[in-house]
Amino acid sequence: MRLLHESTIDSALLMEQNKSYKKYKVILKRILDCLLFLAKQNLPLRGHREDISIGSFGNTGNFLETMLLLAKYDAVVGQHIAKVKEERITKQPMVSYLSPTIQNEFINLLGDHVRMTILASNHRWDVLKSHVPINVKRACETRWSSRHDAIHALGSHLDDIIDDVLEELRGGDHETIKTKDDAENIVLCVMTYPFLVFLYFWSTLLVENNDAQKFLQIKGLPLDQCALKMETLAMFLAEERDTVVKEATIYALKICQIYNIATEKRVCRRKKMPDEQTTDAGLSLDDKVRREQYEVVDRLRAEIINRTSKLQELEKIFSFLKTEVC
């Protein structure tokens, strides 16, 4: 009972120890952040004379100088460094956590973490390759076809990824806790009605979009043919608008039935104001997803039409440069 109520003889000492633990935990967190910053910038840590008490009379190195700069704006670091300087003057022993020893220890721990991350990544990649015949890729801002490749790999092997890869990663006896948590979070994101709808939706649109992108990259292609290809893509979006949305809904409902995924959720209604009589009807999950799909198609078509008109204007301006073939 005394332990629960902190009324033992050494309770005051234990409270002081806990306060000290919390304080040094905060200090070590700031030291680690400083080391990560220097490592990210590829900067050396040490200087000519690693003594924090010499102040501005010598080069103490990037690490100590960064800590001194941080001490000007951070009260915790400022108090710690002030105490370290005071103890250096009075010649009293004190653990400062600023020596090269603690720096090397942090660097070794960071190296071990990076090494384990790389090894775990290779293991996850081996599991993925053993069940999926094509590489699952991520979107890249600098490559035009990256989004099509990412969606194609996921859409064409969705069952293998869900049933085999993710199940093995989140339920394996030799997997780390982080790997299991990440796999579980991915499953929760993938196994939703909106995700499945947009997976089919983008798979259909990006096929045509990727075909147009590859055509536009042909060397020596005239501007009029570029504009014609863009017009064809805009025409496809106008004609297949309803069909793509309908087929995406059918595909998602089919997958939801297989995996017992909910296709409805509680409708969020707008809060009624005082003296307001009408009630907000709200949107069901299916209606909301349909609306978002139509918005995407209409926005995409409008952008393509706008860029097509720009190409046509350029073609008219520079049409005199075309060589006539007899």
Image (tube, helix red, strand yellow):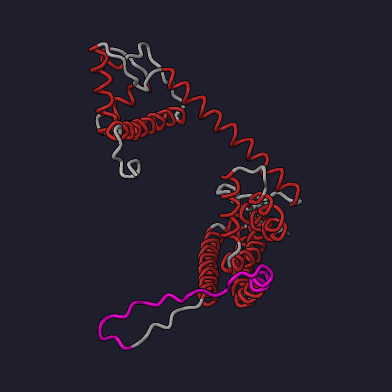
3 in relation to 47, above or below: below
The residue positioned farthest toward the front in the image shown: 1
Q: Residue at x 51, y 71 (%)?
A: 292
Q: Is residue 207 magenta?
A: no
Q: Nearer the viewer, residue 157 or 204?
A: 157
The residue range painted magenta reads 251-277
Q: Residue at x 59, y 37 (%)?
A: 117
Residue 219 shows up from this direction: no
Residue 92 shows up from this direction: yes
Q: Is residue 172 left or right of residue 264?
A: right
Image position, residue 32 (x, y; %): 41, 30
Q: Nearer the viewer, residue 303 or 15?
A: 15
Q: Quadrant of residue 207?
A: bottom right
Q: Nearer the viewer, residue 64 or 300?
A: 64
Q: Could you tell me what secondary structure mostly forms the magenta stretch?
A: loop
Q: Nearer the viewer, residue 311 or 37?
A: 37
Q: Is residue 160 left or right of residue 206?
A: right
Q: Residue at x 49, y 25 (%)?
A: 107
Total labels drawn? 0
116 in relation to 201, above or below: above
Image position, residue 83 (x, y; %): 25, 22
Q: Is residue 103 left or right of residue 215?
A: left
Q: Quadrant of the N terminus?
A: top left
Image position, residue 214 (x, y; %): 66, 55
Q: Is residue 279 left or right of residue 176?
A: left
Q: Is residue 269 magenta?
A: yes
Q: Quadrant of residue 319?
A: bottom right
Q: Residue at x 31, y 14 (%)?
A: 93
The residue positioned farthest toward the bottom in the image shown: 277
Q: Quadrant of the C terminus?
A: bottom right
131 in relation to 82, above or below: below
